[in-house]
Image (tube, rainbow, N blue to C red):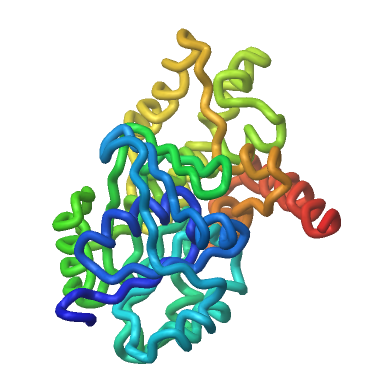
Amino acid sequence: MIDGQPKILLFGAGSVGTVYLYLLSKVASATAVCRSNYDVVKENGFIINSSIYGQNIHFTPNVVRDCTQASATDLKPFDYVLVCSKAIPGTIPIIIRPVVTPGHTVIVLIQNGIGIEDEYATAFPNNPIVSCVVYLPATQRPAGIIKHGETERLEIGSFPSSAPSTHSEVFAKLLRDAGATAEVYDDVQIKRWFKLVVNASWNPLCALTLCTDVEFMESSSPATGLAFDIMLEVCDIAKAYGYTISREETEFQLGRAKARIATKKGIEPSMLQDVKEGRRMEVEAIIGNTVRMGKEKRVKCDKLEMLYVLAAALDSRVDKAA
C-alpha cells in the first residue's frame, strides 16, 4: 500500500473498468493499462458522464501501455489487479503476470461468462481470486469518453467458494467507501449463472442476426419462444451443477425484454456491439464454456450448441480479417 492506500491496477480500461477505477481512485492509488485508447487518455484523461456520479467528470489516472511498463514504473507490488477486459481464454493471465506478486496481489475478475476463473487459479495458485458479476451499462465512444447509465452493482465472492471470504469482504468495503454498490456472497457462482441466462441467449442471438432484442422478437412468431428455450437450457445446466434458477425467475428475465417491445427501445448486447465494431466476442466464456459444462453433465443443450458453433464461426472471421 502507498501511504495507507491500496495500490490498484486496472487491466481493461473500457467503459466499465474506467468507472470503477474512477471510484476506487478516491480511496486508492490508481493505474490504468490502456491499449487502443492510450494516446487519447495519456493526453486528455477520461471524461465520464454518469447518470449516478455526475456529468463531465475529468478523471486522469496514471496511464501505462502494458503490464511490463506498470511493473517497471513502481517496484512496490500492486495490492489489486482488476481484470475488466473481455474474457478471451488463454491470453490474459500471461499478460498480467508482471504485475501479479505471488502471495500478495488479489486478482479481481470483473468479467462475463461462466468457468472463467480456472485459468487464473492455475496460473496464480498462490494469489487470492475475487470473482465479480457486474451490472453497469456503459459505453466508451469515442475513446476516452465514458457514458454511464442508471445502474451500478457488483456481486462479489471468493473463488473457489471454499476459499476464505476475507479478500472479498475487504474489496467490497473498499468499493462501498468509494461510493460503489458491492454485495458479498458465500458462493457468487449462482449470480454468474443467473446473469448467464440472459447473456447466453440474447448475446449470440442478437450478434448472429444483427438485431436488438426487440427487433429479434418482432422478426417472427417463434423468435421469443426460441430465446426462452435457450434460457431454460442454461437453467438446466446450472441445476446440474447445484444452482437452481426457477422458471418464474427465467420468465421474469424474458419479461424485461418483452416490456421493451412497447417502447421500441431494444438493447444491443455486447456481442452485437462487437460485431458492428469488428471486435472479438466472448464466445468461449459465455457460450462455449456453458456448452462444455452441459455436455460434461450430459445435459441436453442442442440450441445452445448450435449458437456456439455459429457464433464461433462468426468470431473466427475477426481473426482472419485482422
- Tell me the quadrant of the picture where the N terminus can be found: bottom left
Would you say 164 lies left or right of 99 here?
A: left
Relative to 189, say whether 232 is above or below. Answer: above
Percent across and percent down for residue 22 are 32, 55
Q: Residue at x 69, y 43 (%)?
A: 277
Would you say 128 lies left or right of 223 here?
A: left
Relative to 35, say whether 15 is above or below. Answer: above
Q: Residue furthest front?
A: 43
Closest to the observer, 308 or 103:
103
Relative to 106, say whether 125 is above or below. Answer: below
Percent across and percent down for residue 65 are 56, 72
Q: Residue at x 33, y 47 (%)?
A: 244
User: Is residue 195 visible from the viewing direction of this image?
Assistant: yes
User: Is residue 295 visible from the viewing direction of this image?
Assistant: no
Percent across and percent down for residue 108 are 36, 68
Q: Residue at x 42, y 16 (%)?
A: 259
Q: Quadrant of residue 210?
A: top right
